Amino acid sequence: MKPSSVAISRRRFVQGTAASVALPLFLPRHVLGDDHNASANEKIRLGAMGIGKMMYGSHLPHFLRTAEVQVVAVCEVDTTRREAGKKRVDDTYGNTSCAAYVDYREMLDRDDIDGVVIATPDHWHAGMILDASAAGKDIYCEKPLTNTLREAKLVMDAVKKSGVIFQTGSQQRSDNNFRYACELVRNGRLGEIKQVMVNVGGPPRPCNLPGEDMEPGLDWDRWLGPAPMREYSSVLSPRGIHNHFPSWRNFMEYGGGGMTDWGAHHFDIAQWGLGMDESGPVEIVGPENPKATNGVKFVYANGVEMIHGGRSGVTFIGTEGELFVNRGQLESTPEDIIKQPIDDDQIHLYRSPRGGHGGHCQDWVDCMISRQQPNCPIEVGARTVAVCHLGNIMYLHREELGDASLKWDPAKWEFVGNDAANRWQDYPYARREGYELSIG
């Protein structure tokens, strides 16, 4: 196959299988090019959306040294970050051919781009996922997957329909420690699981930051996107290249606080260990103090309770022991639980090519080639962030809802018998004109 026909053939394959995504998807590695010395046109061609700390410091360096891919475009609304992203790509490849965009839709219009990596603020995720999947691009999107419950359902349905390969950036799933912990739980080493403690930060708050002089070279309107218009703040969009995670995460217009930030990691592991990747809790119970920012209880149909609180990380509590897991930590009571091997005939969970962030990204690349589902596909990411949003709705709107308990139907994706709660599945305001979601 000629190098110039690689992207077109792949695109036709994805489009042709979109209507039958229930069938196994496989595209031989040689179709996309497996030769480490292959030309750029024979590689998987990627575009990068959002050149902030996560992209500039983690994703770009990884994909730039990944033999199977070629980064060909960057997109960023801040001029300094956009130019820095382009320079990093060009310097790595020794050329000046990396395209730079302000509007990500121009990137998606390119037929020669196979996949996109999304690392923008959370309030942009849903729109970008919907547009990228409609364009037939494979997608790696940072966690938390979306900024509202409704968005999570929309992107889950759209990606499944499109047939593109989607990886949620919940890299703890590619960490051997977390996988082994969940295998121990799933194989009954703790007996019957009764409770799970997950300690992450609390809910977000409305943004009330004071305005500042505008950052030169920043398209502030486009940074805000669907969110309400407000004055510029360097807290939300730090000036130029920065080496910290900005605090837009703390404000409900752009993120979901600690509940969706670290919650998208740790609630994800809890769901994995409980075998609830395709489901979720059926009841959300508020803490006794309606002003509290922890203590929400998630109850599953089998009676297991997951509680927002306890030790930082994830603690599984069973009839025969307890197991605690966090980054770099794995402990159990009794101690010998974590020393037991998982036999060949027992439950083994998905194993990425290697551990950590790099292994998680490589898993997506491998699955772009094989057309198989990766470690954290769209439904897993959507149902994990749903747990986070369910907790936030209880924290933020308990007094308005007038109820300390909400029934949730994870199959129908709705609160049972509570119209007020269902209205909080999305923003309380309309998306700004020009930034509506494109729903096919």
Image (cartoon, helix red, strand yellow):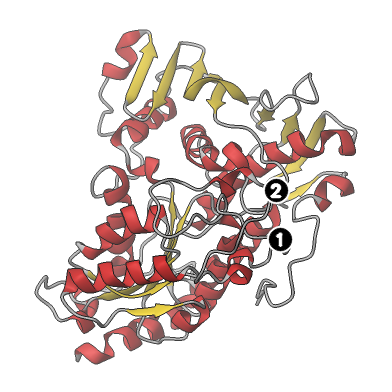
Tell whether label 1 touches label 2 (CB within 8 Å).
yes
Q: Nearer the viewer, residue 133 or 127?
A: 127
Give left or right: position of 40 versus 116.
left
Give left or right: position of 280 versus 377.
right
Tell me residue 399's x, y (percent). Answer: 87, 33
Looking at this rendering, what residue extends furthest in the front direction? Answer: 213
Amino acid, disc 1: Arg
For mark 1, give the secondary structure. loop
Q: Is 77 situated above or below 326?
A: below
Task: Locate the C terminus by quadrant.
Answer: bottom right
Tell me residue 229's x, y (percent). Answer: 72, 64
Looking at this rendering, what residue extends furthest in the left direction? Answer: 37
Q: Is 50 situated above or below 311?
A: below
Sooner in the amino-acid sequence: mark 2 or mark 1: 2
Q: Which residue is mark 1?
A: 230
Give left or right: position of 221 versus 361.
right
Looking at this rendering, what residue extends furthest in the top direction? Answer: 334
Q: Is 318 situated above or below 352?
A: above
Q: Which residue is mark 2?
A: 207
Tell me residue 407's x, y (percent). Answer: 78, 37
Q: Is 313 situated above or below 417?
A: above
The residue depicted at 51 percent of the width and 16 percent of the height is 318
The residue depicted at 43 percent of the width and 60 percent of the height is 240
Tell me residue 199's x, y (percent). Answer: 54, 26
For mark 2, give the secondary structure. loop
Query: Quadrant of the rendered structure where residue 124 is?
Result: bottom right
Label 2: how many residues lie within 10 Å, few (<14), some (14-19) or many (20+)? Answer: some
How far apart are labels 2 and 1 at the CA level?
9 Å
Amino acid, disc 2: Cys
**Whether residue 266 can be seen here:** yes
